[in-house]
Amino acid sequence: MDKIVILFLFGILLFASPLVYWWASPAFPWYAPYLLWAILIGLIVLVQRHHEH
């Protein structure tokens, strides 16, 4: 399976599943969603750079 498809499925799992209740709970800091988005975007950039070479 293509790595970008795997990252897409990981993003769906992370942001559109019951896991949202876990990372959006008051126990996590306010910046947790932004950090998760930044990690996902960073992984996509790394995969794209590796794919171009």
Image (spheres, rainbow, N blue to C red):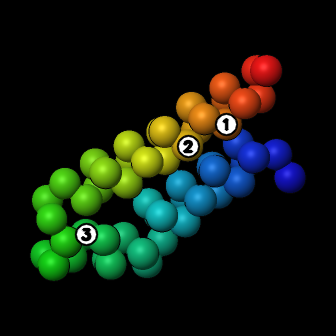
Instruction: Decide: few, some or many residues near mark 2? Use Cα within 10 Å; few <14, some 14-19, many ≥20.
Output: some
- Name the residue located 25 percent from the left edge and 69 percent from the top edge: 24
Element type where label 2 sits in the image: helix
* Residue 26 percent coordinates (x, y): 13, 76
For marks 2 and 3 on the same chain, the one whose residue lies earlier in the sequence: 3
User: What residue did someone put label 1 on?
Assistant: 47
The residue at which mark 2 appears reads as 43
- Residue in view at x 32 percent, y 78 percent: 22
- At 43% across and 78% down in the image, what residue appears? 18
> Tag 1: Cα neighbours inside 10 Å, few (<14), some, or many (≥20)?
some
- Indicate the position of residue 30 as horizontal and vertical percent values: 14, 59
Q: Dot 3, how many residues are within 10 Å of its Cα: few (below 14), some (14-19), or many (20+)?
A: some
Of pointers 3 and 1, the one earlier in the residue sequence = 3
Find residue 37 and report its horizontal and vertical position in percent: 39, 47
Q: Hey, which residue is sitting farthest right in the picture?
A: 1
**Could you tell me which secondary element the residue under label 1 belongs to?**
helix
**Whether label 1 touches label 2, CB < 8 Å:** yes
Q: Residue 24 carries which label?
A: 3
Q: In which quarter of the image is residue 21?
A: bottom left
Q: Spatial distance from mark 1 to mark 2, Cα to Cα?
A: 6 Å
Left/right of residue 5 with respect to residue 28 in the rendered view: right
- Distance, label 2 to label 3, CA atoms, is 21 Å
Q: How far apart are marks 3 and 1 (CA)?
A: 27 Å
- Asked if the residues shown at circle 2 and circle 3 are in contact, with their CB atoms under 8 angstroms apart, the answer is no
Placement of 45 over or under 52, stated as above or below: below
